[in-house]
């Protein structure tokens, strides 16, 4: 059995409803994220919201990051449980937008500047170069975004958010458009981000069940209930209790693959 404890509440989404005109997109979405601690391991949380295309994941992503307001309901974050405000959570949208006329170094510098830390030019340079090495971007700092592959741009975008110091980082479909080998690298990278700080919380919104579940400690399934309009959380998958969390290579475990198939059948 895995040794872990669920401690204080980090995020609470309550009764979230979203309507566009009369069309209900999200209905009574409720979930909570707790700080999970493990003895002798510094590790944050990795939560996923899984659902089929078109179900409302990106809308929920925007609500969780404070970019749009729900029709009703609240998202409270942090120990103080205050309403989320745009800019307080790191956001990695599906098309990872970078400043295209700035070098990778300068894109990363913008992330660091947003952390509000007072740093000299040299201190900033050390931090950026050190992180670039950890994220395998050291050879690309002088390039412009258009000169990088999709996977590399995504790493820059993730690192940019890490450098802001935001504890919550939301990712919309981080596996889409990547080939299987690069997907495995994204796994590794996100685990690395998670290990940087005990309270780092990654929230992954995705329809890629296997890659997302393999990384997560908890997954919320977003689906429609029969006869009801709008998507809601229909199931909570506690991968810690099931013994699947924090296990590299879990994608090859056949009982885990059964779980993936089972979830697929319910989307
Ligand atoms: N601004 C909008 N006005 C009206 N409907 C919208 C708007 N944005 C998204 N939708 C609808 O909300 C639904 C959910 O979209 P989305 O959250 O992007 O799905 P997913 O990310 O799960 O693929 C879709 O049917 C989409 O057409
Ligand atoms: Mg989407």
Image (cartoon, rainbow, N blue to C red):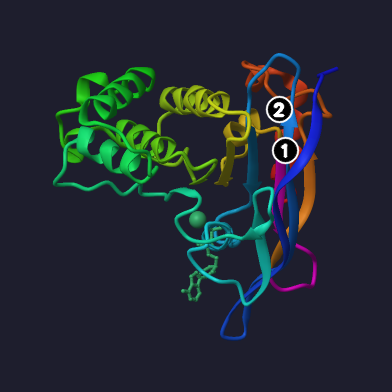
Asked if residue 194 lies left or right of residue 35, the reply is: left
Residue ID at (74%, 32%) = 36
Instruction: Name the quadrant of the N terminus.
Output: top right
Q: Nearer the viewer, residue 145 or 119?
A: 119
Judge whether 223 appears above or below 41 on screen.
below
Distance, label 1 to label 2, CA atoms, is 16 Å
Residue occupied by mark 1: 218
Residue ID at (68%, 21%) = 246
Q: State which tag comes first along the sequence, 1 or 2.
A: 1
Q: Position of residue 179 (x, y in %)?
A: 41, 30
Judge whether 91 appears above or below 242 on screen.
below
**Number of numbered discs:** 2
Residue density around tag 1, few if under 14, some if 14–19, many if 20 or more, within 10 Å: many
Q: Nearer the viewer, residue 181 or 7?
A: 7
Q: Position of residue 60 (x, y in %)?
A: 58, 60
| Image disc number at residue 163 | none
Judge whether 47 appears above or below 151 on screen.
below
Picture quarter containing residue 122?
Answer: top left
35 magenta-colored: no
């Amino acid at each position: 059995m895995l040794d872990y404890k669920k401690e204080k509440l980090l995020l609470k989404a309550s009764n979230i409803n979203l309507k566009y005109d009369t069309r209900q997109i999200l209905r009574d979405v409720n979930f909570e994220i707790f700080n999970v601690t493990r003895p002798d391991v510094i590790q944050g949380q990795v939560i996923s919201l899984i659902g089929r295309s078109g179900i409302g994941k990106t809308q929920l992503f925007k609500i969780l990051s404070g970019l749009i307001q729900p029709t009703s309901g609240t998202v409270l974050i942090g120990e103080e449980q205050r309403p989320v405000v745009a800019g307080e959570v790191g956001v990695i949208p599906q098309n990872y937008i970078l400043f295209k006329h700035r070098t990778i170094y300068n894109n990363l510098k913008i992330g660091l500047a947003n952390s509000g830390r007072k740093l000299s030019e040299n201190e900033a340079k050390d931090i950026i170069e050190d992180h670039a090495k950890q994220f395998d971007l050291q050879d690309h700092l002088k390039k412009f975004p258009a000169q990088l592959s999709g996977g590399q741009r995504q790493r820059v975008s993730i690192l940019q958010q890490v450098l802001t110091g935001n504890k919550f980082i939301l990712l919309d479909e981080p596996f889409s458009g990547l080939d299987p080998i690069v997907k495995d690298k994204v796994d590794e990278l996100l685990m690395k981000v998670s290990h940087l700080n005990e309270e780092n919380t990654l929230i992954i919104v995705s329809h890629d069940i296997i890659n997302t579940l393999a990384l997560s400690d908890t997954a919320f399934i977003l689906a429609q209930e029969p006869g009801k309009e709008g998507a809601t959380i229909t199931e909570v998958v506690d991968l810690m209790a099931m013994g699947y969390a924090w296990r590299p290579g879990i994608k090859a475990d056949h009982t885990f693959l059964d779980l993936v198939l089972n979830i697929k059948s319910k989307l």
